[in-house]
Image (cartoon, coloured by chain):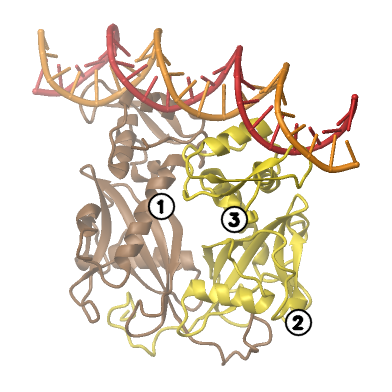
Chain colours: A brown, B yellow, C red, D orange
Amino acid sequence: MGERSPSGYDPRAFPAFAVTVDLVVFTVRDREVHVLTVRRAEEPFAGRLALPGGFVHVDEDLEAAALRELTEETGLDLVPGHLEQLATYGAPGRDPRMRVVSVAHLALIPDPPAPVAGGDAAVAAWHPVPRLLGRPARLAFDHSRILRDGLERARSKLEYTSLATAFCQPEFTIGELRAVYETVWGQRLDPRNFHRKVTGTAGFVEATGRTTTRGGGRPAELYRPGGAALMNPPLLRASS
Amino acid sequence: MGERSPSGYDPRAFPAFAVTVDLVVFTVRDREVHVLTVRRAEEPFAGRLALPGGFVHVDEDLEAAALRELTEETGLDLVPGHLEQLATYGAPGRDPRMRVVSVAHLALIPDPPAPVAGGDAAVAAWHPVPRLLGRPARLAFDHSRILRDGLERARSKLEYTSLATAFCQPEFTIGELRAVYETVWGQRLDPRNFHRKVTGTAGFVEATGRTTTRGGGRPAELYRPGGAALMNPPLLRASS
DNA sequence: GCAAAAGTGTTCTTCGTACACCCATGG
DNA sequence: CCATGGGTGTACGAAGAACACTTTTGC
């Protein structure tokens, strides 16, 4: 003992870990959820797709590392958008070379998120999630698992937060917001009830007064994200 | 560059981190939520209370490390009970001695959880959470923040999962289960509607056929935790 | 008998669901 | 004028909130 708890230990006696951040970056494009991937150049898993990510710097916060890696590897930033910690993956064998603990983050951004330029942009690409999750596992390391967890987190957070607006342009129509829900949940929603629910929930969306006719049909009101983060009561997906 | 992403790096070139697990262990006792703490023996924060935790071993999974630390420091185990990852805290200055990334876990156990014997049991103690969270911060490092996050997670998970049973003995009455909710949420619930809701939700609780008169009044049916983890529709706390 | 907690029944209201219907544009 | 999506009104049913009432124990 003597290394139990941060008290009474020898600074040179603890095991050294590599700490990385990995990013599950989702966007909604063409009525499909897409995730940002990079192509690995080297072993292990050379040639395979992976989630973007990399080592945390010595004096860098975890979230700052996630933002930096995103910019370096894909040239994207998250304004507008959303970033949150997802979970940490640290099974001993997850990287065959060494002990790596990876703090996975979930990011949501509107599409098109600037045509992925800068940094390693050449190797960064969007992929539709359903195809990527089919057997056999197509992603390097335990990234399929991380992707699956990220998708589940995103799905459930749409229910009780106003997070869906992070997938939308700064100004959006209720129909566009509904398309986000329908895509992420893989489920049709009644346009009329959805409209009432969203506009009736205080702080979810805020009317700009302007309208647009993109998408055809009668001009639609444009909305901004409202101030509220949590939605109560939640928007329920059918239990079917 | 060259260290961006797990591809193409020099194994000796990444920054070395210490990785620890910290535990937010809650129980419900005397109608108050209590958290398990240890008293720090050494600097920094000598004499202050802290969450139990310690370094992850080289060949050890994160969850295994959490379970081991809990046993070593407090002699507790989590059967019955519940353990899940909470979040990871890695701000550069959070430990003044070195760069430590801590994977916090949330654990729930029934009370009385065996009188905290074994290991460093002498320094482990239960404290009521509200008093611990008052200003000024009483906990070492960023443990007040972790505790606050753990409490919030526990509160919200009671809404949409059957997790409250993890605070109960293997067999419990509906009244005892209700006391868990009332304590964690700090809010009274209607006993009659609560009873209907809980027994009417498939898979939440399962009748044993036995009854008990502990707690006085008419004998109450005893229940076991049901198989279901998620609750739909959720049990809502008043928005007030 | 009385207090205390368990459990059931009933009413009211709120809210989700389904769908009829009208509106305002582009082609 | 018609197809397309936007938005409102309304009726029905399920579920939560409030509470009257009965049950079964300990003291």
**Residue drawn at (64%, 54%) of the image:** B168
- Are dots 1 and 3 in contact, CB under 8 Å? no
- The disc labelled 2 sits on which kind of residue? Ala
Measured from the top left, where is residue A164 in percent x and y? 38, 42
Label 2 sits on residue:
B41
Q: CA distance from mark 1 to mark 2?
A: 39 Å
Asked which secondary structure carries label 2, the reply is loop
Image quadrant containing the N terminus of chain A = bottom right
Query: Is the residue C21 above or below the residue A41 in the image?
Result: above
Q: Is residue A47 left or right of residue B194?
A: left
Same-subunit check for callouts 3 and 2: yes
**Circle 1 residue:** A153
**Disc 1 residue crowd, few under 14, some 14–19, many 20+, Cα 10 Å:** few
Alpha-carbon span between mark 1 and mark 3: 23 Å
Q: How many marks?
A: 3
Query: Chain under label 3?
Result: B
Tell whether label 2 touches label 3 (CB within 8 Å).
Answer: no
| Type of amino acid under label 3 | Ala
Q: Secondary structure at mark 3?
A: helix
Same subunit under labels 1 and 2? no
State which mark lies toward you, 1 or 3: 3
Residue A170 figure quarter? top left
**Dot 3 corresponds to which residue?**
B166
| Residue in the picture at 32% in, 34% down | A178
| Mark-to-mark CA distance, 3 and 2 | 31 Å
Dot 3 or dot 2, earlier in sequence: 2
Tell me the residue at 71%/80% (across/down): B120
Q: Position of residue B102 (x, y in %)?
A: 55, 72
Residue nearer the viewer, C19 or A69: C19
Residue B124 vs A106, above or below: the answer is: below
Residue nearest the viewer, comparing B78 with A208: B78
Pick the quarter of the image with the C terminus of chain A. Answer: top left
